Amino acid sequence: MSDVTHSGGVGLPSRHIGDEAAKRLKRRYAAEARFKFFGMAALSAACLSLLVLLWTIVSEGYTAFQQTHIKIEVEFSPDNIAPAGTADRRRLMAGDYRAVLFEALDRKWSDVTDRDGQRLLEGLFGSGAEVQLRDMVVADPSLIGRKVEVWLLSHSDVDMFFKGHVGADEASGGRMAARQVAWIEALRAKGEIEKRFHGRFLTGADSRDPEMVGVLGGVMGSIFTLAICFLLAFPLGIMAAIYLEEYAPKNRFTEIVEININNLAAVPSVVFGLLGLAVFIAFFGMPRSTPLVGGFVLALMSLPTVIIAARAAIKAVPPSIREAALGIGASKMQMIFHHVLPLAMPGILTGTIITMSHALGETAPLLMIGMVAFITDVPGGALDAATVLPVQIFMWADNPERGFIEKTSAAIMVLLAFMLVMNAGAIWLRKRFERRW
């Protein structure tokens, strides 16, 4: 035996190892080093991809929380708003605020008299400007008959240009005219155009105009839908898991049930959408496009996963816990609900967190039951027509207007924040139920 110095094995008795054994050890440690390197490379690639994804979303979407406003003096003429002098809310809502805006444009740009120029001036403002004027009068009828300076929402194309998403050459050669670009630059020089916090994006619902869209309608629809899904899938899943794990006899029937549960967990989600369309809407006649039906469909989709996770958590509780409970005189139900279930609850909640997060991002089953409808109101309950945030993102991403790209990225940011808050609450509950033995 010759003395061998082996640099790969730290702490090995290198003087008493043969040449062949040393070579094998060297190859083995080299293979382990390569495996460790590939593992670190895979982890680094995954983290880098996640960072690139998040950076892309944030860099595209953070500007959506601000919207370009233009300062202009308007006169709330009674002839356009309330000719009869009434302050009735319905009459004020029906006022001609478009005429109020056009008159303000004529006063501010009195030198623009040609028809094309007036049309281009009108294009500086979107429909949101008229809505703003209406809301101001409805909130304060004393404005009628007065002249005030207000900051009004600009058109989405103006907003994209002012934020720098569209260059001057691209704007003048596309949806905006050269005269509009010149007017915007003149307003910039006077300080009469600026970006302001866009609260409507967080408090509004869907709209045809990018500058008027909001995510609250989708957020509330998601909350109602997930609440119904949780209230159905969570207790039913736990009860089914308890029965299958603690009470059901081990025979051919229960084996078939278990196989079907495992198979249902792997069924594509669109199939559950077709099932909901055929059963809940076509057969039972439940209202279409409502969180109630959406929650039922997502509950059907989530139930197998909750059952599997709950069974695994219950099975992980040591048999000694059951034996000790029964040994001191507890009934089987007391043993399950007082001892086994509290210890299994952290694992059950972990599976439920994953399932609810999966349900939050689903679109295919909800598209099948009509939750893709264009809903301009924030739903007030589970029976109101609604959409959910992932479906709203899907619809905005399919819109060709440049303004919706920004809004889509911002809505994804809201969805991620919503999911983080939901998961944080579930993790807190899991920690509260966690017990050590």
Image (spheres, grey):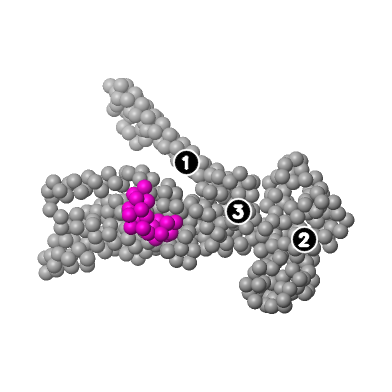
Disc 1/disc 2 C-alpha distance (Å) = 54 Å
Q: Quadrant of the N terminus?
A: top left
Looking at marks 3 and 1 on the same chain, the residue that comes earlier in the sequence is marked by 1
Looking at marks 1 and 2 on the same chain, the residue that comes earlier in the sequence is marked by 1
- For the residue marked with disc 2, what is the amino acid? Phe
**Would you say residue 403 is visible in this rendering?**
yes
Q: Position of residue 234 (x, y in %)?
A: 31, 60
As for residue 13 lying within the magenta part, the answer is no
Residue closer to the observer: 250 or 321: 250
Span of residues in magenta: 274-295
- For the residue marked with disc 1, what is the amino acid? Ala
User: Helix or strand or loop: what does disc 2 sit on?
Assistant: helix
Q: Select label 3 or label 1 by which is in front.
A: 3
Disc 3/disc 1 C-alpha distance (Å) = 37 Å
Which residue is labeled 1 in the image? 46
Name the residue: 32% across, 64% down.
Answer: 433
Which residue is labeled 3 in the image? 208
Disc 3/disc 2 C-alpha distance (Å) = 22 Å
Residue closer to the observer: 61 or 182: 182
Q: Select label 1 or label 2 by which is in front.
A: 2
Q: Quadrant of residue 167?
A: top right
Q: Quadrant of residue 174?
A: top right
**Would you say residue 419 is visible in this rendering?**
no
Name the residue: 43% across, 54% down.
Answer: 360
Mark identifier at residue 102: 2
Name the residue: 75% across, 73% down.
Answer: 78
